[in-house]
Image (cartoon, rainbow, N blue to C red):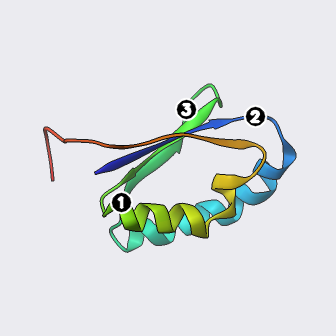
Amino acid sequence: MFVVELAFTDHPSRLELRPRHRELLTELHERGELLDAGPFEDGSGSLCFFTTTRERVDAALAADPYFACAGVRLVAVRELTTLFGS
C-alpha cells in the first residue's frame, strides 16, 4: 500500500480543480486502486491510500492536475506495510 500526503494552501486553483480531482479519485476507488482518501479536519491537507503499485500511483499523480496545482504541495509518497487487512 502507498500513502500520499498532501498539504494545502488557500490558492483558488485548488478549489477550482477539486471537483474533477474527486471524480478521478472515485474512478481509482472503483477500479480497486484507491482504498480511501480524504482531507484532514483542519483543512491543512489530505491523505490518499493506494492499493496498487508505485508505478500506478505515479501515473495517477501525473494524470490529475490537482496534485501539481499551486494550492497543493505533495508532501510524501510512502510505502506502508499494513498490519491489518490486505
Residue 31 position, x and y percent, is 37, 74
Q: Whole-Å distance between the Cαs marked 3 and 1? A: 23 Å
Residue 57 position, x and y percent, is 43, 61
Mark 1 element type: helix
Give the label on residue 9, or none.
2
Mark 3 element type: loop
Residue type, mark 3 in image: Phe
Residue type, mark 2 in image: Thr
Which quadrant would residue 9 be assigned to in this image? top right
Q: Is residue 46 above or below residue 55?
A: above
Q: Earlier in the sequence, mark 3 or mark 1?
A: 3
Pointer 2 with pointer 3, Cβ within 8 A: no
Q: Is residue 52 above or below residue 36?
A: below
Residue pointed to by mark 3: 40
Residue 41 position, x and y percent, is 57, 29
Residue pointed to by mark 1: 54
Which quadrant would residue 29 be assigned to in this image? bottom left
- The residue at the point 58 percent across, 65 percent down is 62
Q: Earlier in the sequence, mark 2 or mark 1?
A: 2
Pointer 2 with pointer 1, Cβ within 8 A: no
Mark 2 element type: loop
Q: Whole-Å distance between the Cαs marked 2 and 3? A: 13 Å
Q: Whole-Å distance between the Cαs marked 2 and 1? A: 26 Å
Count of number-bearing discs = 3
Residue type, mark 1 in image: Arg
3 vs 1, front mark: 1
Which quadrant would residue 44 be assigned to in this image? top right
- The residue at the point 62 percent across, 65 percent down is 64
Viewer-nearest residue: 18 or 53:
53
